[in-house]
Amino acid sequence: MSKSKADAKKRRTFMVFTIPGFLLYSAFFIFPILMGAYYSLTDWDGVKKKFNMIGMQNYVKIFQDKQFINALGFTLKYSLFLIILTIILAVCLALFLNQSVKGRGFFRSMYFIPAVLSMLTVGLIFNQIFYYILPPIGKALGNPTLSKSLLSSPIMAIWAILFVNLWQGLPIPTLLILAGLQSIPMDLLEAASLDGARDFQKFRFITVPFILPVLSVVLVLTLKGGLMVFDYIQSMTGGGPGGATRSIALLIYEHGFTQNKYAYSIAEAIIAGIIIAAISAVQITFTNKKKGV
């Protein structure tokens, strides 16, 4: 058999093996997106069989909807705070766990436990803590901020949710960064020490470049978690107080499943998806430039 015929046969074989994956991908990803785009141009409530085509009216209403604008602003602000705090705290914790300290293995194991818990369960637990445990402690200490539930304050609620998110979400980023730290050659650090480099200089010029690929992964995961935050908010505040913590995901859920604005919620989801894709593209491009890709 000639080489060209062998290559053609190999390509056909590869194509046959890709067909099942392509069909599944089309059935569970491409087709739902196309159907969603179609329904977003209608006034379907998600229940009735009959609906009317209304064109781009849903999209026009969304950009005039103060609820959507406020939810988008909250989601972007929440994501920004989450990214900054996650990276700073995860790097600090990874540096600590990378040291030779007594009980390091036990602490690593215990520290990872929150990551395996359900987000909804964690949110419900902390909801009770913020409402029934912290206020009596705050009153006993004479602290007016803690004397009432943080979740009832439009200003403090976002920080309370961020605390819970960080408590559960930090282990995985920390573990990834710790793995990156352990890939740094010790000879390089020792050579830098012999040359008189200080700890900050070694961190800036050696540690950061080595863990930058890991940091980009952490950034993508954290950005996704922040932009799609739902469980914590649903279980702790329900979007309150006064809509101060209503995220894009929660707003889409409310419109689609509690207010029967199904087509409208799909249009919101499409716009949110485009915004998330654009932000992710900018972030990936930026990190690739930093890595020199």
Image: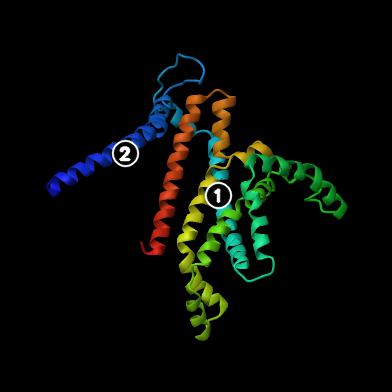
Residue 18 is labelled as 2
In depth, the one of 67 and 133 nearer the eye is: 133
The residue sitting at 57% across, 77% down in the picture is: 199
In depth, the one of 183 and 83 nearer the eye is: 183
Q: Is residue 139 left or right of residue 277?
A: right
Kind of residue at badge 1: Ser
Label 1 secondary element: helix
The quadrant in which residue 154 appears is top right
Q: Is residue 193 left or right of residue 123?
A: left
Height in image: 190 above or below 6? below
| Image quadrant where one finds the C terminus | bottom left
Please identify, in this view, whether the residue under mark 1 or under mark 2 is nearer the observer: 2
Kind of residue at badge 2: Thr
Residue 79 is labelled as 1
Q: What percent of the width, then of the height, locates residue 183?
A: 49, 67
How far apart marks 1 and 2 lie (CA) works out to 36 Å
**In the displayed image of the protein, which residue is found farthest to the left?**
2
Height in image: 41 above or below 124? above
Label 2 secondary element: helix
Q: What percent of the width, then of the height, locates residue 274?
A: 42, 40
Asked whether residue 164 appears in the rendered view, the answer is yes
